[in-house]
């Protein structure tokens, strides 16, 4: 079994790629470049971070999200009008979100949680509505994908669980709207334990001194890419690792990885809500992380050991 044969075993595209999602991804790729230039030439600071930092992060995130969603939709055995329209709704909602974010940067104002003026309040309310719409549209797509067998069981479950965790990550964004900002006319915050604008990590901007709800929000959202890619990697590695040729091994590893991902999401959320920065975990956080790691290692060993019950499949 060669690597090329393993790649051939991956599920193939069976429906057209959703073009609006691809156009949206391309537009965000261009926006990411524009925002990068903005970071280099524009020295303004908004809410404690470089003015073009938020558009850049959102653009990169939307590129990953859109490409992954378009590809997963195309793996369905046949096209679905409902799924196509829900994906288009995702594009419309995401576009409105990005237009407001960039528009507020141009105005030199923060986009999130800002109710300083009637216009700012209207824009913030619009953003809140669009993210709810995006969540519901993704939920509908997720249900449709969950009901469809894509590839073998390991790949199918990686898609189902990846989408479920992504929806949880999207939902965690609502926690930010419930935080007290400590600033007049700002009804929400990313940071827990201090106003937004504390020192941040390079690239991400996540707080290095206090809890930051953007950490679990980001981590959860990208399960949609991480878990299906993990399942695909297992298939590609199968030629060199014979145990991975056994479906039950790959399924066990996918389920273990998914459980570990979900548990880590819960841990990151708990850590942030306690006002603790990601890079400065206390003993309780480290103990919980060690417990998750132990469960993942045990799950991996059990999954690999299950192959011994089918030696013929291993030797095939």
Image (spheres, rainbow, N blue to C red):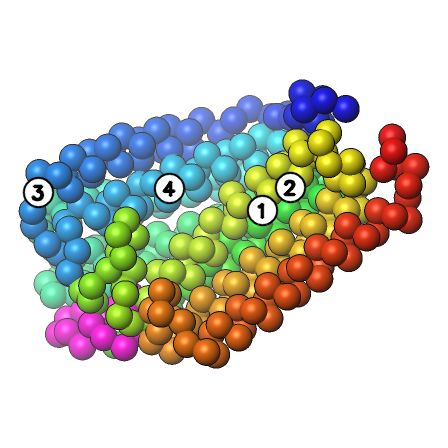
Give the residue at x 57% y 35%: 73
Boundaries of the magenta span: 181-195
Disc 3 to disc 4: CB gap under 8 Å: no
Expressed as whole percent of the image width and height from the top left, the position of residue 143 reads 61, 49
Q: Rounded to the nearest whole Å, what is the CA distance between mark 1 and mark 3?
A: 37 Å
Q: Rounded to the nearest whole Å, what is the CA distance between mark 1 and mark 2?
A: 6 Å
Q: Rounded to the nearest whole Å, what is the CA distance between mark 3 and mark 4?
A: 23 Å
Disc 1 to disc 2: CB gap under 8 Å: yes
Q: Kindly identify which residue carries mark 1.
A: 227
User: Are there few (<14), some (14-19), or many (20+) residues within 10 Å of tag 2?
Assistant: many
Give the residue at x 77% y 50%: 304
Asked if 32 appears above or below 268 in the picture, the reply is above
Asked if 81 appears above or below 268 in the picture, the reply is above
Disc 3 to disc 2: CB gap under 8 Å: no
Residue 217 in view:
yes
Element on which disc 3 rests: loop
Q: Which circle's residue, 4 or 1, is located before the other in the chain?
A: 4
Q: Kindly identify which residue carries mark 4.
A: 62
Q: Rounded to the nearest whole Å, what is the CA distance between mark 4 and mark 2?
A: 22 Å
């Amino acid at each position: 079994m060669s690597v090329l044969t393993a790649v051939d075993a991956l599920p193939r595209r069976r429906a057209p790629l959703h073009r609006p999602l691809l156009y949206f991804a391309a537009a965000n790729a261009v926006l990411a470049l524009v925002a990068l230039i903005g970071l280099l030439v524009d020295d303004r600071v908004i809410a404690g971070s470089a003015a073009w930092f938020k558009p850049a992060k959102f653009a990169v995130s939307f590129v990953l999200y859109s490409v992954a969603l378009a590809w997963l939709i195309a793996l369905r055995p046949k096209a679905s009008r409902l799924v196509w329209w829900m994906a288009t709704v995702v594009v419309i909602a995401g576009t409105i979100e990005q237009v407001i974010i960039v528009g507020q940067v141009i105005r030199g104002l923060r986009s999130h949680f800002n109710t300083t003026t009637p216009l700012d309040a209207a824009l913030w309310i619009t953003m809140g509505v669009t993210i709810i719409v995006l969540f519901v549209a993704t939920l509908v797509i997720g249900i449709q994908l969950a009901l469809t067998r894509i590839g073998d069981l390991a790949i199918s479950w990686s898609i189902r669980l990846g989408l479920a965790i992504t929806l949880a990550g999207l939902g965690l964004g609502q926690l930010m709207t419930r935080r007290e900002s400590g600033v007049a006319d700002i009804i929400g915050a990313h940071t827990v334990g201090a106003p937004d604008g504390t020192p941040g990590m390079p690239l991400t901007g996540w707080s290095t001194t206090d809890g930051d709800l953007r950490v679990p929000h980001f981590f959860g959202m990208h399960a949609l890419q991480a878990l299906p890619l993990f399942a695909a990697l297992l298939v590609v590695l199968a030629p060199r690792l014979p145990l991975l040729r056994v479906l039950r091994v790959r399924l066990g590893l996918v389920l273990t990885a998914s459980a570990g991902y979900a548990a880590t999401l819960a841990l990151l959320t708990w850590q942030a809500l306690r006002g603790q920065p990601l890079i400065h975990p206390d003993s309780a956080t480290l103990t919980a992380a060690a417990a998750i790691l132990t469960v993942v290692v045990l799950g991996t060993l059990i999954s690999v050991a299950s192959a011994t019950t089918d030696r013929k499949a291993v030797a095939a």
